[in-house]
Image (cartoon, rainbow, N blue to C red):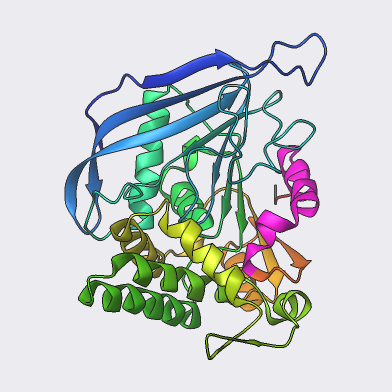
Amino acid sequence: MSLVNTAPHPDSVEPSCSEPHAGRAAPSAQRGEIAVALPMRHAGVRQVVLRYELQGQGDGPVVFIAGGISAHRHASASATFPESGWANALVAAGRALDPAVVRVLAFDYVGADGRLDAPIDTADQADAIALLLDALEIERLQAFVGYSYGSMVGLQFAARHPGRLQRLVAVSGVHRPHPYASAWRALQRRAVALGQMQCADVPGLALARQFAMLSYRTPEEFGERFDAAPEIVNGRVRCAAEDYLDAAGAQYVARTPVTAFLRLSESIDLHRLDPASVPVPVTVVAVEGDRLVPLSDSVSLVEGLAGRGQLRVLRSPYGHDAFLKETDRIDLILAAVLRGQGTAA
């Protein structure tokens, strides 16, 4: 790995107006971009731009947070950047990831801007994070909190850069993709391909996202939310869940380039890692009913960690999306981990 530009260029650095703790300086938030030369596992050395956001006290410990392939550098709202973030309920005052206590770092995944049309490995993402830490002069992370794809990247980071990480929390993401989940993603990518053949990239991507939503959630949730009789609209039968799926597709295509979706979806299926190669303590969080990451795979990961892993199991109707919905329960786990009580010694 090599750095092209080691000086980060912050877009904005401003103090927050909030005062979550009396007598404590208000947290700050900054964004920046760093150009690097990234040696990639399947694509050679590529010039990429790492876009990050760092929120919190200047001298606090750093926690890196990474979500699914649609997550990005803006994890939560601040006075500097007030729009809601993808982990808004977890990175907040009074939470384990309170920016007044820890510094929370996130970035846009390599390939998320749609400009890199090449195979992207989770190991590439992990190496990109190491380069980002170099540029920001952050020697070691207190923790890496990963959800879904972010858990896969976190495992790679722990294996490839163990000296830079104290502990890892891996939620709904393990050492390899399940074949059932890979089949779901393959169909999603085929939906995009069919759209491209018809010069309808956006409808194809929207359909792929709708397929994905079915895999993220559970039949139990759909049974509770959409148990209404279908309607006949313009001579066609329309099911109760279709408005929800249409909205999910429209929201996704408004912010996601087609190439980014395809390459990051592929990246999940490229992911492979030997759990024995991870030398740091790992808290593995599994969700009963997760259709993409079965509980048995999380058990296999913990067994492969050989004493360095601890398994926590949640029951939730939200399936794979439990991390974003069961925020109180996830926060309790994170609080224990950051106190050093939630992982193997």
Task: Name which residue lies at 61% across and 39% down.
Answer: 84
Q: Quadrant of the N terminus?
A: top left
Please determine whether, in this image, residue 14 is positioned above or below residue 197: above
Q: Is residue 180 above or below residue 335?
A: below
| 206 falls in the magenta region | no
Q: Where's residue 2, x and y in %?
A: 24, 34
Quarter of the rendering containing residue 265: bottom left
User: Which residue lies at the image location 53% right of the left edge and 56% below the top edge?
Assistant: 151
Task: Please indicate whether residue 161 sits to the left or right of residue 242 in the image.
Answer: left
- Name the outermost residue toward the right: 22
Farthest residue to the left: give it: 44
Q: Position of residue 13 (x, y in %)?
A: 50, 16
Percent coordinates x, y for residue 189 in the rendering? 34, 74
Magenta range: 320-340
Dominant SS of magenta comes to helix
Tell which of 167 and 25 is nearer to you. 25
Q: Quadrant of residue 101?
A: top right
In front of the other: 176 or 181? 181
Q: Is residue 335 above or below residue 58?
A: below
- Asked if one can make out residue 60 in the rendered structure from this viewpoint, the answer is yes
Q: Residue at x 52, y 37 (%)?
A: 74
Apparent side of residue 169 relative to residue 140 in the rendered image (left or right): right
- The answer to whether residue 297 is visible is no
Q: Residue at x 64, y 17 (%)?
A: 16
